[in-house]
Amino acid sequence: MTERPGDPAGAGDHDADHAIAARRLAQGWAAAINGTSYVSMSQDEVVEYLVGLATRILTALAAEPFNARAAWEVGVDLVDSHFTSSATLERSITLLGEEITQALPDLAAGRVSAVQGALAGGYGYALRQRTLHEQEAIREAVLDAREQAEAALRASEARFRALFTEAAIGIGLADVDGRMLDANLALQQMLGYSLEEFRGFSLQEFLHAGDPESTHEAYRQLTRGDREYFRAEKQFFRSDGDSVWTNLTVSLVRGPDGEPQYQLAMMEDVTDRHQLQDRLRYQALHDPLTGLANRALFLDRLARVFNRPERDRRVGLCFIDLDGFKVINDSLGHHVGDELLVAVAKRLAASVALNDCLVARLGGDEFVLLAERSSGTDQLIELGNQVLDVLADPIRIGGHQLSVSASIGIVERPVVAGGSGDLIRDADVTLYWAKSEGKSRWALFDPERNAREVARFRLSATMPAALEREEFYVDYQPLVALADGRVIAVEALVRWQHPEHGLLAPDRFIGLAEETGLIVQLGRWVLEHTCRQARQWSDEFGDDAPFVSVNLAARQSRDPSLVSDVESILRETGLRAGQLQLELTESAVMGTAEDQTSALRKLYDMGVRIAIDDFGTGYSNLAYLRRLPVHELKIAGSFVEGLRVAGRPDPVDEQIVGALVTLAHALGLTVTAEGVETAAQAERLRDIGCEAGQGWYFARPGPPAAINRLLTAQRRH
């Protein structure tokens, strides 16, 4: 197509699509409301008129920011064009919801509901204004009739009688004390009473306890002559027991002397609109699948609890998440998943029916129980157990016997403690605890545990910046040959000098780095830093320089860039591959995937040493180990513990260490024992055949300068 200069590309296509959508919507709209209202337009003219309204609605739906005011004005315009039937409004609301959802499937559901509600609001407002104008005209006619000269009394009275008799709204006339004097046909039909029956009533009898106090007070003021009229939306009860909702206006008619003489009541039947509003309100606050309260209603009820705190009042939440629901959805289909949700919702509602709790579906497979007046933690725990019990029995759906369980997060506290947002957050956190602890259980919120986890989260959040600010540093611990006491290697151990918390050992942050994925970046920094230091030792001490051993976390070992990173660092630092050893935990290396084994093989072939750390605490699968590219085993310190005392070693530990050393040697591997703290341990390990030891007996971890001193002293001897 040819674009106009200055127009955005494709703007013409967008306008054309918009016009087509508006006409399609208008045609369906015209068909839906055909015959519901009497207007002086042909069907084609109706379509053209509705095209304009549809265009305004679609424009408002697509506008940013979104504003439903245009839909409200469309409702007003419909009434102004004499589309005044309640059926017109109901069919319009229904059609707009269906057609807009089909035409704009990506549109947020909240916008469609807002447009429907705004159109109904504008429509109701216009009808009410029209009624008020008609009521005012009648009132003025009454006053005019009183003010006319005696000669025109009959004509005036005839006009009033015509208005009174033929008016579409109900009109009742009572004396100053409220005794009914007259009622027109519309009022008789509206409430189901004859004129004779009406004359036996007093207006006070139509007021009842369910009316707002403001209505009672307004009527009292009117009967005293303190006000001329009042308006209210009021419910009346028909003679057959049904109810009618009306827009009511009661006016005081004064005599020539200014004293109250009559009461004039006028009412418009708005039952259809009221019911429609009730339906829309219900749909806005309830889940369409399960019929339970939805998130909006739950949040509203919870906000009311905290907005009106009472002395000693407590509140509790049970956050519920179905275990394994995604597997059911993916394997059996969403229709089975939906039926399962409906069945679960029924069981939850039945289980708390006697506990005065709100049951809501928050979305997906998440539900919540709200105890607005909790009696204490025990009540919430009992609710949690009830939920687990009612879900214990399998649910049969479409020939499938489905077993379902749930994880539940429970929070219960005084209302004054925090706000609704804190309560929801803590319940969500507690639900996560229940999931992580094995599912099919409940967990109770623990402030101390939460504080620890928040502290861990904050610590993890500061790690990237800490790496940039060089808050991390590396200490080194020697690995000593047991045969002659020489330092043959050093293990790199990262530390974090935190500006607030001081020195942090690896157990405070390595797990966090693993969880957040920062371990890859941190591990590369440690590897590069250590290799640079190793090159300095190599330049200074030559063949006496130790090789450096660097720990690899499980996620690092699975990182696809591991081999290229090692190659790059060795090339940049000038360190020989044989002077670098990478330590992997036993659990990380056993059962590794083929691509991970391939990475280890490439490193092995490059000349990089591979060691298994803490051996004996995991799989201890030497049969599998023989297929892996490994140079060394490091025996966990827990096995060396039994060799602390000279002459009295623990026989079990001694046999385990001996067996491990023998088998490792059979596989061509060297062995280093960790956790060596006494001379007796070092001597016994040497006798068993262990090549090297590491532990506080030889040296504690320290800065590079401490290793320099050891190497210098070693060279002198």
Image (cartoon, rainbow, N blue to C red):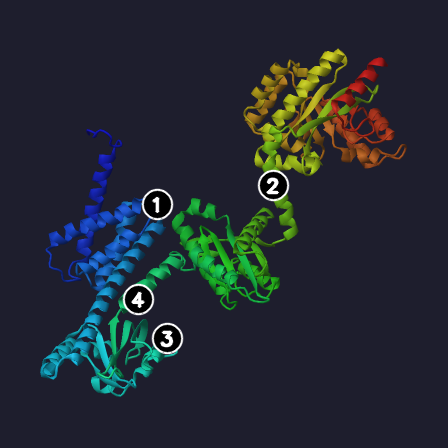
Circle 1: element type: loop
| CA neighbours of label 1 inside 10 A, class few (<14), some (14 to 19), many (20+) | few
Of the image marks 3 and 4, the number of the one nearer the N terminus: 3
Confirm or deny contact between disc 3 and disc 1 (CB under 8 A): no
Of the image marks 1 and 2, the number of the one nearer the N terminus: 1
Toward the right, the furthest residue is: 647
Q: Mark 3 points at which residue?
A: 211
Residue at 22% from the left image edge and 47% from the top image edge:
55
The residue nearer to you, when weighing 357 against 110, is 110
Residue type at tag 3 = Asp
Q: Residues under labels 3 and 1: Cα distance?
A: 39 Å
Q: Which mark is residue 65?
A: 1
Of the image marks 2 and 4, the number of the one nearer the N terminus: 4
The residue nearer to you, when weighing 213 against 663, is 213
The image shows residue 702, relative to residue 283, as above or below, that is: above
Q: Nearer the viewer, mark 2 or mark 3?
A: 3
Quadrant of the snapshot with the N terminus: top left
Confirm or deny contact between disc 1 and disc 4 (CB under 8 A): no
Circle 4: element type: helix
Q: Mark 4 points at which residue?
A: 274
Of the image marks 1 and 4, the number of the one nearer the N terminus: 1
Q: Residue 458 carries which label?
A: 2
The image shows residue 186, relative to residue 461, as above or below, that is: below
